[in-house]
Image: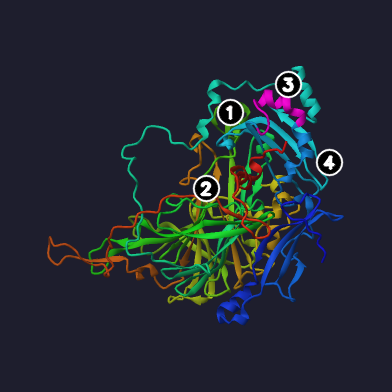
Amino acid sequence: MNLNLTRGDAARPSDNSIYMIQTYYPPKADVLKYFSSLDPHDAPSRFARVTIHHGGTMEPVIRDYLVGPLPVTPATEMTHLTEIYHTKTLPYNARGYDALDWNLPEITTKIAAPLMDAYKELLGSLPNDTIVAGGAGPFGFDGSFRRFWLNWQRDTPGFWLHPLNLWQYIDVSGTDPSKWDQLKIVYNHQVFDTAESFMDAFHNGTLKRVPPVTKQEEDLSWSTRERIGTLRDLDDLPGPRSVSFAGLRFRIDHDLQYVSWMGWGLYLGFDRDMGLNLWDIRFRGERIIYELKPQEALAQYTGNDPYKSSTALLDSYFGMGQSVRDLLPGYDCPDEAIYLPTTTFSATGMMTRKRAICIFEQDSGRPISRHLGFERSEFGAVKGYQLVIRSVATFEYIFHIDGTIEVRVSASGYLLSGFWDEEQGAYGSKIWNTTLGSLHDHVINFKVDLDVGGTQNSLLKTSLSQEVTNQPWFDDDWGEEVIQQRITREYIDNEDEALLRFPTNFQGGYTIVNTDETNKWGIPRGYAIHPGYSPVYNTVVGSKRLLKNANWARYNLAVSRRKDTEPSSSSMWNFNLPGAPPVDFHKFFDGENITQEDLVTWINVGMHHLPASEDVPNTRTNTAASSFFLTPFNYFDYDVSIESANAILLQPPKNPGDPFSYNDYNVRPAHCVPEPPAAFEYYPEQVYDLDGKPAPPSTVEEMRKASELYLRIKLEL
């Protein structure tokens, strides 16, 4: 196969180049066979997924390829990967993120050069001086074009909070930059079809201008993270920190990326699209989950300007995993956390972060169970220890000693703000003089492949309702009628009926059960899906910018029959193809039976974010958070957290006034002088070039380009 490739670090849109290389996961049946035998001969063959931008062909396209088996031998082949998509082709206008969309001189000449006088006078500066641009997406609808709005903002710390009142609509379709053009300019709610008509209005006095910046507004320090205000009482002292005096109670096999703790065991995974994921999660020797993996993150904005009203982001396109940076020791994670590295591949090389994942045990500060009692052996408590696996891409997985898994997303950072004027009031809040905190939804989708007592599972729906009943034993004092709750249980047999929202008032829920496996009491063993904090789904339905590419976001959860050809609810290409998505989630649901089949549950978390002044400078993780729980539901015969020796059992005193006697199972607080925390240090990620050799250290500007992507665009003037 003659691919005629150009190195990614030198490629132009009209070249063929490798955009991405990732692991391609083997069929589940092959993996389970290997887990059962552990025979090296049963180990699944290894394949890579290679994405190539074919910009140099007669009909430019994107193609994904499977390359394998690996390592390379005479048996290694390269085949076109199509079976995971619902469309036959991937249009070139939907290609991966490419800074050349705005950094080629051909388009810069058409965008910036004609407007230099207007930039200086209306925005107070010139591009790359003290103002920079940012782009909004999606960049297309069905592959027939690639266009985006540029907004302008002050280039200052916290630039996200300093938008300006000028937007430009840019066409970068196709592979010939000489045909790229500027289609519209919007300034202060006035629309111009050409740079010439805009500049004519600018010069002849017909342009309605924004009032000039005041002296107060010239102070831009309000958007930095420097401490301000009066020092609070005792805040000059360091706060408490967690120390495992008896030593760490979890184990990590660094070669296998395997973690074990208190009966739990699991493998860690990491990918470019969405970052940290978990595999083969077992508790007390039984597999609970085959795959727990974030799929997509949606952020849909609103506003009375071209930028906010057209922004509907799907973050896998930009690579949430690729955007991960090192955690801050002692701040993102406790001082004694263990850190693990990750590596991702991009068009220009590889990037390794030494502290991308942290793992630590924490005391929740409350018992997982307790009771005050006076009979023998009924008074006691079990400590609520948890194991946390966290990545700075906002994901954390929390394991509890009762067999519960909590999946939590918590966000912090700068808002993607808009320019404030009185017409924006319905779309957010004024958070500074000319800054709008834009209303938006976040919805993040997770794939949960539960295997409850095996791969053959069913979906149980439980509903709580009110009934009026009469019983002969009710006396005349109260009457013979009683109004009370009752439970209705039913199995959902068809996946078309498994696109679900949580019931009103959470009166009921959903459980994945195995009807062929029961506990001691004859009840099907199951794992329930419990909503945690802020269980939301997307507010807006029908927008062309999310027409069919994020159908998963319309529900709290959905359950489908598992297929290797449906590995994800989304794809990075969906972002720019809302009208013709390569992965259409609704097509997963085609009337198949889901009774005692291998099932996948797709679960959403998120938030409706109505920003307030307290979101300045950054949103806070305590309220910008969402979660769900996977918890045993008749899976065991009893609460297995009672097995923990980190517990206390009290017995009533024999004589009045005597203390309660107790048994702490000889697990008593350990004490020693702890080692001091390591001195804080933070280094940039290690970058490797396309030859796998260490690249020279990145400049701050290079690091910004790799991290801020299209949100901060410095035009190559």
User: Mark 1: which secondary structure?
Assistant: loop
Q: Earlier in the sequence, mark 1 or mark 4?
A: 4
Q: Earlier in the sequence, mark 1 or mark 3?
A: 3
Tell me the number on the disc at residue 207: 3
Give the extent of the magenta segment: 113-128
| 37 lies above or below 347 | below
**Residue drawn at the location 69% of the way across and 64% of the way down:** 49
Is 127 one of the magenta-colored residues?
yes
State which quadrant residue 210 falls in. top right
**Residue drawn at the location 69% of the way across and 50% of the way down:** 575
Tag in front: 1 or 4: 4
State which quadrant residue 476 falls in. bottom left
The residue indicated by pointer 1 is: 434
Q: Distance of mark 1 from mark 2, alpha carbons?
A: 24 Å
Q: Whole-percent x and y of residue 67?
A: 72, 68
Quarter placement of the C terminus: top right
The residue carrying pointer 4 sits among few (fewer than 14), some (14 to 19) or many (20 or more) residues within 10 Å by Cα, namely few
**Residue drawn at the location 25% of the way across and 63% of the way down:** 373
Q: Earlier in the sequence, mark 4 or mark 3?
A: 4
Callout 3 amino acid:
Leu
The residue indicated by pointer 2 is: 411
Q: Earlier in the sequence, mark 4 or mark 2?
A: 4
The residue indicated by pointer 4 is: 178
Tag in front: 4 or 2: 4
| 489 lies above or below 148 | below
